[in-house]
Image (tube, helix red, strand yellow):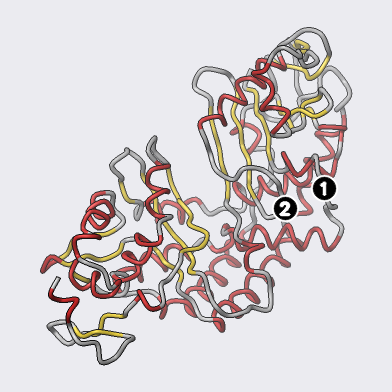
Amino acid sequence: MKDQDQQIDNPASISTSDNRPVEILALKPIKFKNIRYLGTLGNDWSLMDYNLSKLIAQNILYAAYHQPRSVAEIAKSLLVNQNLIENEIAFLEENGFMDKVKNNKYLTNILIHDLTKEIYEERHQIYTKCAQILCQTYIPRLTQVAEELMLNIDLPQSIIYIPHNDRNFLMWALVSLACCRKIEIPNLKHNLVAHYVHRNDGSDYLVTTDLEVNFKLSYDAQKYASFGEMYLSNKTLPYSIWQYNTYYDERSLNWNRDFQTNFDYLYDYMKNEDMKYIHTVETHDCASLAPISKRQIVKIAPKNKEATKYDNLYQNGLIIDEKVNLIILKIPFNDFLTKLPDISEDTFKLNQEISEQIYNISKTQYPPHLQELAQVFYQRSITSNDMKIRILEQLLRSGFIKPINNNQKKTVNMIMFCAK
């Protein structure tokens, strides 16, 4: 390619035909860290994730992030032959990660958090202060829910199973679920949904990512890089799974083909008749946590040594010592959410205040075509993973929740909801 024969006087950049500099990423390539998908993932999500995880794709996206670039300009930035990246660019454009704009140029359509050390440190102070306020005002209200659930836990009418009746294990789950679903401002989420991109596999989501940095921060940023919330509603069996993956657990962070199969097997495991296990409430009073009539005992059998289909349940820590190792609630997911306290008007005001602060100190780092998206993204700062993990961290420090053991790390912040 003749463009590659151009003399490079400044090894950090090359000028294009309109004299705009093109940064030479090949000399100092960037790398994504903590890629997040906000929205609904399709069947081919793993293919998308694979392509975004490739270093060549990441640097293509960054080359066209701050301003539109042609294929030739992107190739110059990466110091590669144009033919080598045309297919990569085509994939990224066809799947909504880049937009083709005028003059056959491309503009990246994902939110890359390319922030300075000073911005990271200032944001850390804002998030930490806000987490302290939420720990003092909202989180203690969850204790009443926990007490009601623990009240009749050993009785046949109980609607909950908790491994070893561990109240602390329950509090971890309640705090995390509330952080994900109740410390929320729905109308602001709708604003974000408007920016979701429809992908070829039928999914609709927004991609955000951080960049790996070469400076040291005063705090462990990776601790707050949670991989987030997951929710699976089974289409054939009456259960759903909710989980929140964090720095504190020890389990696979991604959905995979075995995930639903494992819980199908777990549901089957619990239907056996040899051992009393949990209680099915066929009907319940949706206005309270108290179950009412038509109760049926569900039992569980010890592991059949010849039944290898259960092996993954043991390997993944879903069953330990012949007992299920996660919280099970005999109430539908959405019904249970109504039992958790709503946020107050003061929390709405707190979110607005810190969202404006976070956006104002960060906005100069986002390109013009993504300024509106960045502002909408930060409108829900109290719902961010940065906030949720800081809440858990502070609750651990205060003793409101206590450290969990190795077995609990397999299923902490995981709940199975059985609808009937």
In the depicted view, which residue is nearer to us: 400 or 343? 400
Q: Establish if 139 lies above or below 251.
A: below
Is the residue marked by circle 1 packed among few (<14), some (14-19), or many (20+) residues within 10 Å?
A: some
Query: In the image, residue 34 lies at what x, y percent?
Result: 52, 59
Cβ atoms at labels 1 and 2 below 8 Å apart: yes
| Residue at point 28%, 42% (across, down) | 200
Q: Is residue 100 left or right of residue 315?
A: left
Residue 335 visible in this rendered orientation of the protein: yes
Q: Can you give x and y, in whole percent of width and height, for residue 226 in the image?
A: 61, 55
Q: Quadrant of residue 146?
A: top right
Q: Secondary structure at mark 1?
A: loop
What residue sits right under mark 2 in the picture? 248
Q: Which label sits on residue 404? A: 1
**Which quarter of the figure has residue 166?**
top right
Q: Quadrant of residue 253?
A: top right
Q: Nearer the viewer, residue 383 or 292?
A: 383
Relative image position of residue 25 (x, y in whole percent): 35, 75
* 187 up-or-down from 65: above or below: above
Which quarter shows the N terminus?
bottom left
Which class describes the residues within 10 Å of circle 2: few (<14), some (14-19), or many (20+)?
some
User: Which amino acid, by three-letter code, is at mark 1?
Assistant: Ile
Image side of residue 207 versus residue 240, left or right: left
For the residues labelled 1 and 2, the Cα–Cα distance comes to 9 Å
User: Residue 123: x and y, percent?
Assistant: 59, 75
Q: Amino acid at mark 2?
A: Tyr
Whether residue 136 is visible to the viewer of this picture, yes or no, is no
Figure check: 87 above or below 289: below
